[in-house]
Image: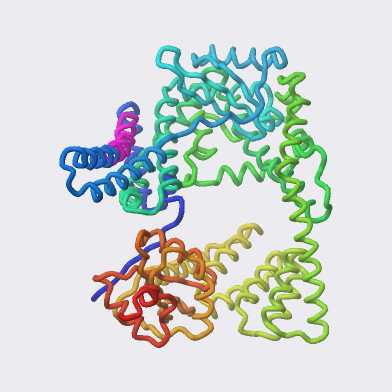
Amino acid sequence: MKTISVGEPPQQGWGQTIALDPRHGPMIARLEQFAARDGDGYRRRVVAAGLVAYVVLTTLLALLVGLTVLMVILIVTTGKGAAVALKFAFVFGALAFGLVRALWVPRVAPDGIALSASESPDLFAMVDRVRCATGGPPIHAIRLTDQMNAAITQEARFVIVGARNTLYLGLPLLQALTSDEVAGVIAHEFGHFVGKHGHSSGFVYRIRRRWAQIAERMPDGIVSGLLRRFFRWYGPWFASYSFVLARQQEYEADAVAARATSAETIANALIRITVQSVRYGSAWSAIWSQSVERDDPLASPHDTAASVFQMEDDADRDVLDRELRAEADLDDTHPTLAQRLHALGRSATLPPPLATPAVTLLGPALPLATTQFDAEWHDWADDVWKHDYRERQEERAEQAALAERITVGETEREALYRHAWLTERLDGAEPAARAYAIVLRHHPDAQDARFRYGDMLLDLDDEAGTAILLEAGHAEPELLPHAYRRIIDFRRAQGRDAEAYLPLLAQAEAAEALATAEANAIDETARLRAADEALRERVSALVADVEGVAALHVAVRDLTHTSKPQTVFVFTAAHGYTGVGVLDRLVDAMLPAGDLIGIEMSRSRRWLTKRIKALPNSRIIDRKQSRFPWM
């Protein structure tokens, strides 16, 4: 049986190498065992894996340059076919230039504010003490940023002179920790260089950055297509190798920092950063929440956000316990807090309240830095703030207008649902639950409204929401996994047993996987029917501005494992465009039409193209007929 499997549609940014998914877990587990046995050998293996990328890129560039030179030689020596050779020389030369341009990494201006020893002598003295204790490299500059973070970067200069090392410290970090804890954080950053992590980490970073640039800068064409195909294999493979190395280096840097300060200091710093980061995030959320209520932003948001660091908060223990329960995943190269504390031999005890924050180390630089960060925030945020305020006023006006229409008898589904959604967004769970109930009163089959109604009831600690979520899920199977997850979260938040729902969730997720697999492949048994006029008009409008489409035909497919139909389209790319690039643009444009599966026409897929073209009114675009009306 003929089958076409498409998997997930290609996405922009294919050069990013850090995205991993669960299927890479076994490989990473094996690599972690190898790294534990032979750390230096594993580091060499990562470098070798990175060199594969440079070999491929260098070979491709050498081939393009060689072909360009060959064409020039043919023009000079033979004189025959000079026009054709000149065209080829231009094409090969342009491709080589495009690849060089994509590979070139420009020097990036440093972030933050440069600090001086005269303004912040205590901070510079601390950094020097930590450097001596760790045996780290000299620091040539210290820069203050507005992030809750710290880092040391190394910028290569000349071979003889060496590198320029810059220490970046976040103002919020200095405000959130004690001086000893900041010293421990800085010691951790030095630890990466003591363990020679800087060279390998920088090597990995440069590879990732170059691939991302190629994906961003290279135009659609044969070179980009070849590199994309190579990267589909290489990206996850290299990401797995570098992921394990990054985790190993975090443990090693913690050990260096513990020797330079103490294990207790590093543990306190890790724990305090965990709880203070949550406080800081909540403070900024509270600041931004005012954007919909007042049209003028706060004058000094950084001081306002930092005021939470020295408060006592009973929620800190809950934050810490939640973080300690977190499991290691493939989204973060850092080990979990529990793993790092275990490696340090320390228990998860909240440090004493913050009395004197390390920000005093900045001296006279502190008010100047705060003023500058506030000014920079206002330059960026004022327009966004005003937009949020204006949007909220518009939403309030729309909500009021819809409420008026409902009062006088409006029963149209979209209007009722929009009013309920706005009520949830603007007024919270209780009025939203009433609004969704009104949708269901007039439209009992509106399962999306039923799901939201059940969700609102659970937000109100009303157990009745459980049955309503399940009713929506059983009526529309796509909602069932989400219903079980929401119920499990609700019961666990109440301290109640959720074990009975776990096998039901597993069963629903298995059905969800079957539906996904079915939606991502198509074979000769597919049930296809003609698209109605409304769908044809919608697709035509959505793809009107998509470049590179020579032909486009659509059909509707009824699926076995889901109740919603799927839009199937086949297309041909115009001359000068790659099929992958055109598919990306078509998928992006057609997403509002619902679930999609797109196939580029080819000889091996002719059976599908014939079936779709045979359906009435399948053609959306066929520019080849308009160009050659006699065919």
- The stretch in magenta equals 43-60
Left-right relation of 452 to 73: right
Dominant SS in magenta = helix
Percent x, y for residue 151? 55, 28
Percent x, y for residue 467? 62, 75
Residue drawn at x 62%, y 29% as measured from the top left = 268
Quadrant assignment, res 441: bottom right
Task: Say whether residue 56 is magenta.
Answer: yes
* Observer able to see residue 243: no
Number of numbered labels in the structure image: 0
Colouring: rainbow
Q: Nearer the viewer, residue 519 or 187?
A: 519
Q: Is residue 287 above or below residue 138?
A: below
Q: Is residue 85 above or below residue 478?
A: above
Residue drawn at x 62%, y 62% as measured from the top left = 491
Percent x, y for residue 250? 47, 31
Residue drawn at x 31%, y 77% as measured from the top left = 608
* Observer able to see residue 392: yes
Q: Nearer the viewer, residue 183 or 227?
A: 227
Q: Nearer the viewer, residue 77 or 288?
A: 77
Left-right relation of 175 to 622: right
Q: Is residue 340 above or below residue 140?
A: below
Percent x, y for residue 508? 47, 70
Quadrant assignment, res 311: top right
- Quarter of the picture containing the C terminus is bottom left
Q: Nearer the viewer, residue 185 or 209?
A: 209
Q: Is residue 161 above or below residue 334?
A: above
Quadrant assignment, res 559: bottom left
